Image (spheres, coloured by chain):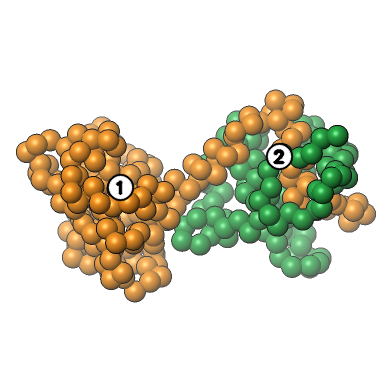
Chain colours: A green, B orange
Amino acid sequence: MSELLSGTLAPPMVNGEAVFEAPWQGRVFGMAHALADAGLFTWDEFRVHLIEEIGHWDRVGEGEYAYYQHFQRALERLLASRGLVATEALELRATQLGERPDGHDHDHDHDHHHGHHHR
Amino acid sequence: MTDSSRAPAEPAIRAEALEALLIERGLLKAEAVDDVIEQYNERIGPMNGARVVARAWIDPAYRARLPGDGTAAIAELGIDGAQTEKLVVVPNTESVHNLVVCTLCSCYPWAVLGLPPRWYKDPAYRSRAVREPRALLREFGLEVPDRAEIRVWDSSAEVRYMVLPRRPPGTENLDEAALANVVTREAMIGVAVL
């Protein structure tokens, strides 16, 4: 599982460990690796999407360089192109999650898990 | 390509949505993501140390100068010590088994091994490594033969230690990269052999 990690597209590291600035970054990193390990795509295929995302940012230059946002988009696009998770389905679920009531205040700086309130 | 017309949810929510959908559709096991992160910390962190070990196994000249000046020897492989401490590599032999500990706190050769495992900081490990290393190692599943001496190396702010494990049998045909994959963090701390 280290192919991607050793190349120029390696994620930010400190002391030999991946640096996740927020829990979601670890989740997308872990998802990509788990799905590749399960054979849903190869690292080369993922890398193509990641290079495209980073290349797009290079050209457009919007906002700050944010490795894991590129990583996340690359994963989303790859899964959509395979018909595994359509963009619309993802958007819909994200919107639903974003509308959770009961004090779920969209503050994701804290390490929250899946103990959401259910009505 | 990135569609700028959509107003994306924030990344944390998108990640949560994606993981939930993948699990619901049977594409991802619920615990798979946690497993990857854990495995990553065990395997990728110690990769530099594993490269040093593999080189020492295939290159006798490198192996010979490794114990003398570990800091210079890892620099040869492009590993930046990134700190001022001296690195000492202690080779296991048939008659000597080495074990690394930090009795005072949790000094650790992180330039080569990443971050220490949780048990390395544990008071019981730190005290028993010195007092009863043989019994401690037995609990790690390692039976050191009575004829072998156990040497315990107490790390400090100035000196960090790493064990050079013995090359396991059956690896004669592996190349350097494949050999590095054989090396584990535990073997380089000395709580396991290969």
Query: Where, by quadrant of the figure, is residue A56 drawn?
Result: bottom right
From the image, tell me which residue sits under label 1. B124
What subunit carries mark 1?
B
Q: Residue at image x 30%, y 47%?
A: B124
Q: Residue at image x 41%, y 70%?
A: B82
Query: Where, by quadrant of the figure, is residue B36 drawn?
Result: top right
Q: Is residue A52 left or right of residue B41?
A: right
Q: Residue at image x 21%, y 57%?
A: B153
Depicted B109 relative to depicted B192: above or below: below
Residue B64 % position (x, y):
17, 59
Circle 2 packing at 10 Å, graded few (<14), some (14-19), many (20+), is few
Q: In what element is the residue under mark 1?
A: helix
Residue A69 % position (x, y):
72, 55
State the residue lying farthest toward the bottom: B84
Depicted A58 relative to depicted A32: above or below: below
Badge nearest the viewer, 2 or 1: 1
Residue B21 % position (x, y):
76, 33
**Amino acid at dot 2:** His
* Front-lying residue, B32 or A60: B32
**Amino acid at dot 1:** Ala
Q: Is residue B188 left or right of residue B25?
A: left
